[in-house]
Image: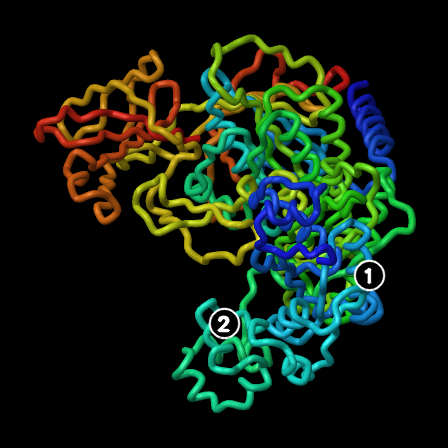
Amino acid sequence: MAVPREARLAALRGQIAALEAGTRTPSPVLAFGDPRIDSCFPAGGLPSGCWHEVMGAGLEDETSAAPAAFAALLTRPLLEAGAVVWIMRRTDLFAPGLAGFGFPTERLIQVKARDEAEVLSVLEDALSTVGVAAAIGEAQAPELKAGRRLQLACEKRGSFGVLLHRRPYGGPVGGARTVSGSSSFSRWRVAGAPSQPPPDVPGLGPPRWRVELERCRGGRSGAWILESSEAEHGPHPFRLVSQLADHDVAAAEPLRKAG
Amino acid sequence: MALGLRPGQKAADAMALVPDLFTTDHDPEADRAALEALSDWCVRFSPAVAIDGDDGLFLDITGTDHLWGGEAAMLADLLARLKRWGVPARAAVADTPGAAWALARFGARFGEDGEIAPPNGQCALLADLPVAALRLDEAATAQLPRLGLFRIAQLLGLPRAQLARRFGMHLTLRLDQALGAAGEALVFRRPASPWFDRLAFAEPISAPDDLARVVGDVTALICRRLETEGQGARRFEVVFHRLDGKAMPVRAGLARPGRDAKRLTRLLVPKLDVIDPGFGIEVVTVFAGDVEPLTAVQARLDAEAGTGLDETLAPLVDRLINRLGEDRVWRADPHESHVPERSVIRRAPMASPSGQTWDPERSRPVRLFKRPEAITAMAKLPDDPPVQFHWRGRPHRVRRAEGPERIGQEWWRGDFDDTGPGRIRDYYRVEDETGGRFWIFRQGLFGTGDEPKWWLHGLFG
């Protein structure tokens, strides 16, 4: 019968989660506020104590503007207290732009690293420091071992790590780069989407992005169009505009295979 | 001297007196370099060493003689080492540099022991010295004996106003400096600091583990002293003195004054791989600079919760600054300027917050290019945003636009000829069909002669 099978699956999943967590207390999760997004994650949101990857599409692979805005908005609710460290190889991050998203730039420490290895090592150092709530690094393609070290560093202090994939300098756009396995919790791909201003208001509306969750550990993938939401409108930084139909997953159907 | 030679004698005369005399050309540069090397070597005795003329050194040994157990022991050690090195020297210890100079060069006893003037007692010892011991200029030194003034005691007996009128203020200044009534500024190779400590080894060390352990020991010494005085320091320098006299320093800086020996050791140990121990290190000295009062902070038992942001972030910031350099770790603060690239100023991350914010009404991009990139754009009317533009060879058709935001030039900063309507920028925030948002500006106005140019300055998220 379907119902006891669902209950048994849920119980099994709970057991696996408990085994994975071990003696650690459950970490607080960062929810998006909309069940259509939060249902993709096993815990109902992005847990802290893990790191996440954000990639851009097309030219964003090099300029990385939409991924940066996405990362800033994503970590905004975590930064009520605590510092954020942003490690980059190209120093073109413009703080007034981040301040426009409600990001606390007075607690932002920017670090310029010389090369990939330095980005990863400073990221690891920042994530394992008490007092750093989130750390964002811009690297090109971290390898599996480096990813595992980042995971360990995040778990040590329960901090939230974000890695923006960015090719630092020019090169062929759209070069195929297969990222096979990775120890990140989730992998996102962010691109800009046309905005819709409120009626009778000229100009641009609040910025929108086409956000795809490519993979998530223990969860489902999905694609949505998200709009940025002001800090005054609520604790969640994004507002779901629409869900994009994804041929792999039908949203209404209960899960039949192990998630 | 015993052979009848004296300085200033002609070489031919000297060779006549001593047939197998070894002569070389006078090389003042090599002499100077040697003197500087000697002054660096003397840092093991005191950090404040100043070069005096061509052949002398001043050492400020305030607060350092206790490490040898007294001034006499320190002087004896210094002279013994110099003798072992083959550097004939005379030395004297006194309250003021002037008195020390006089006693060292003209003191009654020279040879093995140096002269030590008791505190405030240099007047009696100086009285017997010739007037040349006062470091006067040549005219005065020649004139004073002609007037019958041979000894300093005679100068001390004369009324000061007459001396000043006859020989100038320089003479009275030198007298006062020698007796301690006037100050004298010496140019030290390193600033004088009482925060100094040293460790000497019976056997020279050279293994990297030993060097690291020694760094830990010596920083523990200086930090304990800082703690008893309630002070903390921002700059620490550990100098390794090799057997052959070379000194190799290793430095660490802190964002906030501190005295935690473990943290300092962790900052210093990665820098030890540039130290080449040579035949061995025999003395290690440490000094602390930028010393400020620091109150003790009791460490809480639950160190995770509730510690101030400063205490927890400061070690991270220190590690990053010491590893990467000060100019690569910063916090962006607002700066009063309309021009976007000048509206952000970089500050140290632990500096106190400025309290200003950027204008929330003006939207700014997340990425700002250091150099705006040239684009070709078409606009219908002079003040309209462009309808389409080409960037990096790709066309973008503009669907929505905001603007213009006129940002003028800061005419007070440039040449008068540089200002003009050609430097005014009209910024537009445009969105293309795919959703990319760009910050482009038109430089120059239509109708002023030069064709206005379009640039892309930044990208919104």
Pick the residue in front: B130 or B71. Answer: B130
> Horizontal placement of B304 versus B148: left or right?
right
Q: Quadrant of residue B231?
A: bottom right
Q: Residue at x 59, y 29 (%)?
A: A37
Please state the horizontal and vertical placement of residue A63, each as a whole percent of the image: 46, 24
> Horizontal placement of B336 versus B209: left or right?
left
Is any atom of residue A131 visible in this view?
Answer: no
> Which mark is drawn over residue A3?
none
Is any atom of residue B31 visible in this view?
Answer: yes
The Cα atoms of the two marked residues, 1 and 2, are separated by 34 Å
Q: Quadrant of residue A40?
A: top right
Pick the residue in front: B352 or A151. Answer: B352
Amino acid type, mark 1: Asp
Q: Residue at x 17, y 44 (%)?
A: B416
Pick the residue in front: B7 or B90. Answer: B7
Please state the horizontal and vertical placement of residue B184, each as a whole percent of the image: 54, 71
Q: Residue at x 78, y 43 (%)?
A: B244
On-image quarter of the C terminus of chain B: top left
Disc 1 designates what residue? Answer: B77
Disc 2 designates what residue? Answer: B141
Q: Looking at the image, is mark 1 or mark 2 earlier in the sequence?
A: 1
Instruction: From this view, report whether residue A67 is shown above or below residue B70.
Output: above
Check disc 2 and report its element: helix, strand or loop: helix
Amino acid type, mark 2: Thr
Instruction: From this view, report whether residue B27 is shown above or below residue B311.
Output: above
Please state the horizontal and vertical placement of residue B246, each as a whole percent of the image: 73, 44
